Amino acid sequence: MTALPIIVGMGGINASGRTSFHQGFRRIVLDKLDQKARQETFLGLATLMNLVKYENEQLVTSNGDVIVVSDIEAVLGEQIKAGTLIRKIEKNHFDVDATHWQQKLAMKANSDDGLSFTCRIKDLPNPIPTSWQVTEVDKKTANVIVPDQLDVKHDSYRDNPIKAAGQFPTGFDPAIMYNSRYQPRGLQATIFAATDAIRSTGLDWQTVMDSVEPDKVGTYSGSIAGQMNDEGFGGLVRSRMKGERVSTKQLALGLNTMSTDFINAYVTGSVGTTFTASGACATFLYNLRAAVNDIQAGRTRVAVVASVECALTPEVIEGFGTMGALANEEGLRKLDNTDTVDHRRTSRPFGDNCGFTIGEGAQVVILMDDALALELGADIMGSVVDVFVNADGVKKSITAPGPGNYITMAKSVALAEQIAGSEALRERSFILAHGSSTPQNRVTESLIYHKVAEAFSINGWKLAAPKAFVGHTIAPASGDQLAMALGVFSHNIMPGITTINKVAEDVHATHLDIRNAHYECDPMDIAFVNSKGFGGNNATATVFSPTLTKKLLSKRYDDSIWARYSDKVIQTNTVQAQYQQAADLGQYDLIYKFGNGMLDETALKIEADKLTLPGFSKAVKLTVSNQYGDLK
């Protein structure tokens, strides 16, 4: 029987807040929450943003005033809301009103004597141009005459036409939560997200590791651009141009495999499968697919699936902006016929729009095979039945859409119907759209849904689009979508696209239910997480709700197994509640095992049928399945 990949935990961070226990989802649908959930959300965001701290068993504001939970919204609510979701890019990234750049300047001599200047000898170019006349003034200084023209670059500042992004909540700083050692922001966020996901399971991680063979724990993660901050690739490519030295860490820490490596080396201590895939905007789903396939095949029993991108740098934004892919000030003014741009509404999926809004994020989901999940008493948050990936075929423009997404969506829907039936598909399924907020995407993606809905007789197909609130986080974007899907399953609230006034006229919405307000919905059974990436990287995941997952599992396991599971999950839920309370108080206790628990390779023992590692309760079996027969 094929193992079913069960979602037992999810954590992370994006512009809406923390992922665990649906804090980020709750921020998005804030006005639809009951009073208890609303207070929890404001408390969790206040501590995340360092506006409130828990000290001496009481909450204290950054001004030193004692505050109670029920007063946080009244005192800090507007500041919390203003510092979350899409907003004007804050200066801890760079100044969008005065973005630093190097401007060319051609200086011509005003006389036949040429240009004359004095400089330090060590600052002279090497080699010195043959036309220059250099005279030593003293041992450190020289006088230079350039006969005609000198081309230089000088520091300058420009008004950046792209001013909004989905940024981590204002004041959130993972670097101060552990000994981050000047690591790039994306890797700091990875440590936070991985810890959040693991602790959200309510399971002791050592117990999880001891329950399976060491090589049956896998990590699947990646980014696209790599780490583009100064501590990574950004500093590597900029340092010499800025007259600075390249550090020993910038190349290694910049690699897009580093989120995988950091989780293995500093969080889980895994010696199992390590995997990194990059697939443009579908990167998270690519890694999810690898994990799902390995669980289905029995190669992996516990999978940590992740993706991270913190690329809010002038260079990355310049690249997307030059392509015309990002919403800019001029385009937004024309759309709204105003001189004042609302930076909260720059991302408008399926509405009248002019480009996407970039974001930063890190998402991590923990999967287990169904047998292990029941054995350990894991909380069943849902299941990933399968993930489909297809390319677009021959293309003229590498960034243009193509037919691949029709295949991934149609396969996902067909599989859901085969397992859950037509009634569940038509009445209780919804779409987490790629919804990038570009004029082309709103037409091409909606046409896919329209044609698939027609083929499967679906009407009023509910659609949500997370990028309206958190922006396009690129690699982890479909992780944001999965987090929203789990939020809908948990809260029965469907997020509307509140950044649009109406659905654009060219959107194929005949069979779709696209609203611009959040609304309560009946319990949903199936979510389709869809991604359309540059280059023809299309992916769609079929995700089942906890209720449908348990219904599916009830056909596999007898009452005695369910009874044992029910007893164990009570303890799991208790530990989960304890972590949720601690996290809401800002007590994350990040897992960072830098050099702690390193394996002594000399104590490793190899036998003909197994390999025993110190620190692991089970051995690695060497009797692997031989699929090819033998030659004896």
Image (cartoon, helix red, strand yellow):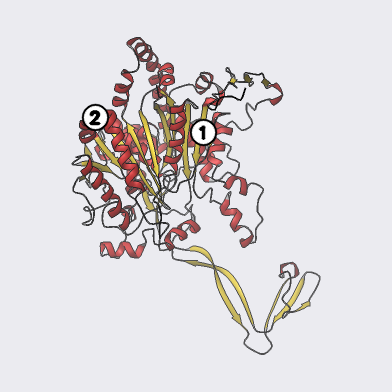
- Please name the residue shown 69% across and 88% down the image: 113
Q: Which amino acid does label 1 sit on?
A: Thr
Q: Which of marks 1 and 2 is nearer the N terminus?
A: 1
- Depth check, front residue: 42 or 614: 614
Q: In this view, does 193 lie above or below 256?
A: above
Q: Position of residue 239 (x, y in %)?
A: 62, 57
State the residue at coordinates (72%, 24%): 602
Q: What residue type is labelled 2?
A: Gly
Q: Report if residue 271 is visible in the image.
A: yes
Judging from the image, what secondary structure is the residue with disc 1 in? strand
Q: Badge 2, how many Cα within 10 Å: few under 14, some, many 20+?
A: few
Q: Residue 363: which quarter of the image?
A: top left
Q: Is mark 2 on a helix, strand or loop?
A: loop
Quarter of the image with the N terminus in it: top left
Circle 1 sits on which residue?
219
Q: Where is residue 312 in the image (x, y as percent from the top left)?
A: 47, 52
Near mark 1 (Cα within 10 A), the count class, few <14, some 14-19 or many ≥20, is: many
Q: Which residue is drawn at 42% across and 54% down?
A: 89
117 lies left or right of 205: right
